[in-house]
């Protein structure tokens, strides 16, 4: 037994609200049970509305158990995780560059110290080799 035109109109309005993410009576999950609740009809009435169900099945390929707000939240979390992963890669790259620069700096420091010591030894030898006036 098909549903009345008024009931079909309520179901279609409820379906539109759910699909647009504007639920009034449910959590917004795209399920037939929520369609019934949103329209204010019984679950059995939904299953008698064959044309509405056919339209529902074409517009909702598989039930989505998350509300539009949850979907947005999950997308934002995924985006933040991507950003965090990229930032960690950049930090690792910069740390590797910093380590390489520290190694080069340490080598230059030791070479500089060795050259200073060599210059000091040469200066002392040159000073001791000069005859004293007398």
Image (tube, helix red, strand yellow):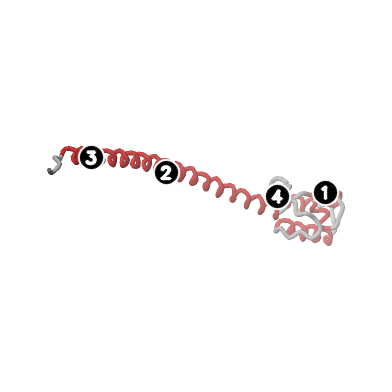
Q: Nearer the viewer, mark 2 or mark 3?
A: 3
Mark 2, other Cα within 10 Å: few <14 / some 14–19 / many ≥20:
few
Q: Quadrant of the C terminus?
A: top left
Question: Which residue occupies the foreground of this view, 97 or 125?
Answer: 125
Mark 4, other Cα within 10 Å: few <14 / some 14–19 / many ≥20:
some
Residue 95: x %, y % from top left: 47, 43
Assign a secondary structure to mark 4: loop
Question: Which residue occupies the foreground of this view, 81 or 127?
Answer: 127
Residue 77's place in the image compared with 16, above or below, is above
Residue at figure coordinates x 75%, y 51% from the top left: 29
- Earlier in the chain: of badge 2 and badge 3, it is 2
Q: CA distance from mark 4 to mark 2?
A: 51 Å
- Earlier in the chain: of badge 4 and badge 2, it is 4
Task: Identify the disc placed on residue 97.
Answer: 2
Which residue is at the far left?
134
Q: CA distance from mark 4 to mark 3?
A: 91 Å
- Earlier in the chain: of badge 3 and badge 1, it is 1
Residue 63: x %, y % from top left: 73, 46
Question: Which residue occupies the foreground of this view, 99 or 25?
Answer: 99
> Looking at the image, do the residues carrying marks 4 and 3 touch, with CB atoms under 8 Å apart?
no
Assign a secondary structure to mark 2: helix
Q: Nearer the viewer, mark 4 or mark 2?
A: 2
Residue at figure coordinates x 59%, y 50% from the top left: 80
Assign a secondary structure to mark 1: helix
- Earlier in the chain: of badge 4 and badge 3, it is 4
Residue occupied by mark 4? 60
Q: CA distance from mark 4 to mark 1?
A: 15 Å
Q: Left or right? Give the position of 48 relative to 106.
A: right
Residue occupied by mark 1? 47
């Amino acid at each position: 037994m098909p549903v009345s035109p008024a009931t079909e109109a309520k179901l279609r309005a409820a379906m539109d609200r759910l699909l647009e993410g504007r639920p009034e009576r449910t959590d917004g999950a795209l399920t037939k049970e929520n369609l019934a609740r949103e329209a204010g009809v019984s679950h059995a009435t939904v299953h008698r509305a064959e044309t509405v169900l056919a339209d529902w099945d074409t517009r909702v390929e598989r039930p989505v158990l998350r509300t539009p707000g949850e979907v947005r939240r999950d997308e934002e979390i995924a985006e933040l995780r991507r950003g965090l992963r990229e930032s960690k890669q950049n930090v690792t790259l910069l740390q590797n560059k910093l380590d390489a620069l520290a190694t080069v700096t340490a080598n230059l420091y030791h070479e500089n110290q060795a050259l200073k010591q060599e210059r000091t030894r040469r200066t002392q030898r040159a000073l001791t080799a000069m005859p004293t006036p007398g």
